Every structure is written in C-alpha cells, then in structure tokens.
Amino acid sequence: MPAGVTATVTAAAERVPLLQFAAAQELERRLLAAAAARGSGCSWAVWRTHQSLVVPSQTTNAANFHIASLDMSLRGWPVYVRDTGGDVTPQSPGTINASAAFVVPRTPDLSIRATYQSFCAPLLTFLGTLGIEAYLSSVRGAFCDGAFNIVVDGRKLAGTAQRWRLTQTSDGSPGVAVLAHAAILADPDIELSIAATNRFYRLCGEDREVDPGRHTSLVTLLGSSQAGAERLSQSLRDFLERE
C-alpha cells in the first residue's frame, strides 16, 4: 500500500466467510464507497464464494451471452457480472479472494501499474512467508490474462482486476478511490474450472481456448493438503491484519 496508509481487515465472522457472489460484490462496493468517502486509508476483505463463472460487464455484449449463461447455470456454473474489469474468471470454494479499497492522490504520475503494484505488494509478501517466490506478469493461455497476474515459475497463481472512482483525499485534494481484487488459486479443480471457462467461450461464439497447464495452485506449490483454501484464507486475513 502507499506509504503512510494503515490497512484494516474486514471479517464478517471469526472464520473467513463463504459468500454468495451477490453478497461478495456488495461487500466490495461498500469497501469502495467507504474509501471514497473517507479519502484516505485502506481496507481489506478476504472471502471465498461458490462455484461459478464471474465475468466483466463487456462480456454481456457477446451475441449468445444469455444462452451460454443458461447452459452453464444448468451445469452448476452460474454466471455473474462483476464490477471490476478483466475477463472470464472461474470461482469456487478453492479460490481465495482478496479485495482492497484505498485512496491515492490524483497526480500526473498516477497509473494503473502503480496501483496494481501497491495492491499486489502485500500479497507477494504473504506468499513469501510461505516460501513461494511470486512475481507479476502476463501468462499466455491463462484465464483472464493480464500484465498483473501473480505468477510462479511461469504459471498463473492469481488473477487481478481493479476499478477506479474519482474522489478527494482527506485534505481535499483530487484523489482516486481504487477497488482492487485478486483471485488466488488455493486448491481448486483447475482442469474442471478451465473446461467450464472454455465451454462458456464456445457457447458465446468466441474462438478462444484457455490452457489448464498454464496455471498452478497453492496446494501444488506447497505439496501439502494443509494448503487448502479455508486454512490459507484465514492465514492471509491474519497476515493482512498484522501487517
């Protein structure tokens, strides 16, 4: 986070919650609204959700979007539209979601790269505490590919997205409230998730194919069943609260 920012962690319960996606999205909207109103500081939320496909709003423009969504829902993969950007992202209880809302001054050197780096820095540090050396990069063939994936040895471990809202800083200067999100693959069924993603693309009439081999997970990297999403989501929340 930017220098001088104090982070707080939102937790709905003692355990990291497994939320319906609508509730998770409302949580993120509240984080962003509070940051914009506050004009300073940073708040985090760590959560998981049920099996689904989450898409940005532009995906709804696909010619067969509604038919594709109905088909996927009948197969146990309901499709939800999110507020942040990116691309089609499979979700499941095996994915750890970390959301942050913070405010930065609206200066000439402000950039999407800078806000992504600020958001990802504590996540990379957390992974380092697990012995995982991660970095930010694109991964050709991964779902929701972008320049700021969290990557280990060339394989995607987490996807990121963000949304900006113009606001003022606490001293009245021009500012930007940033909602940033990371979806970290802890112990999902990657083959199943990517198969669902590819089916959705085909049904939408898009000639795209995601490669499951371009992804990794915490349970694979740590080589332990103890690296499950429930346990590590609590560890991440505790880390953010301390740090």
Image (cartoon, rainbow, N blue to C red):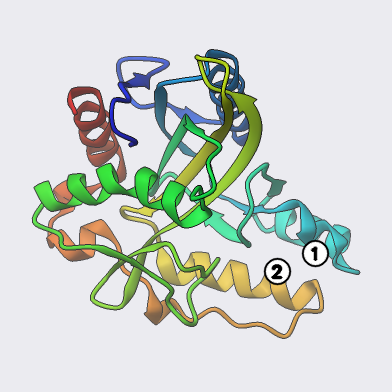
- State the SS at label 2: helix
Q: How many marks?
A: 2
Q: Taking 169 as reference, is 138 above or below it?
A: below
Give x and y (percent) for residue 61: 87, 62
> Which label sits on residue 200?
2
Residue 189, quarter of the rendered image: bottom left
Tell me, for residue 147, which label it has, or none.
none
- Tell me the quarter of the image containing the N terminus: top left
> Which percent across, then down, holds residue 132?
15, 59
In the visual, does 52 lie left or right of 147? right
Sequence order check, earlier mark of 1 and 2: 1
Image position of 47 with respect to 146: above or below: above
Q: Position of residue 143 (x, y in %)?
A: 53, 69
Q: Position of residue 221 (x, y in %)?
A: 18, 64
Q: Amino acid at mark 2?
A: Phe
**In the foreground, 234 or 77:** 234
Tell me if label 1 and label 2 are in contact, CB under 8 Å: yes
Residue at coordinates 34% horizontally, 36% vertically from top-left? 2
User: What residue is shown at x 27% (from left), y 64% (from top)?
Assistant: 135
Rendered view: 15 above or below 101? above
User: Could you say whether the residue bearing mark 1 is in a helix, strand or loop?
Assistant: helix
Please name whichever residue, 69 or 175, is drawn nearer the observer in this view of the structure.
Answer: 175
Tell me if mark 2 has few (under 14), some (14-19) or many (20+) residues whose alpha carbon lies within 10 angstroms of its own.
Answer: many
What amino acid does circle 1 point to? Ala
Mark yes or no: residue 170 visible.
Answer: yes
Q: Which residue is mark 1?
A: 68
Label 1 Cα crowd, 10 Å radius (few <14 / some 14-19 / many 20+): many
Q: Give the Cα distance between marks 1 and 2.
A: 6 Å
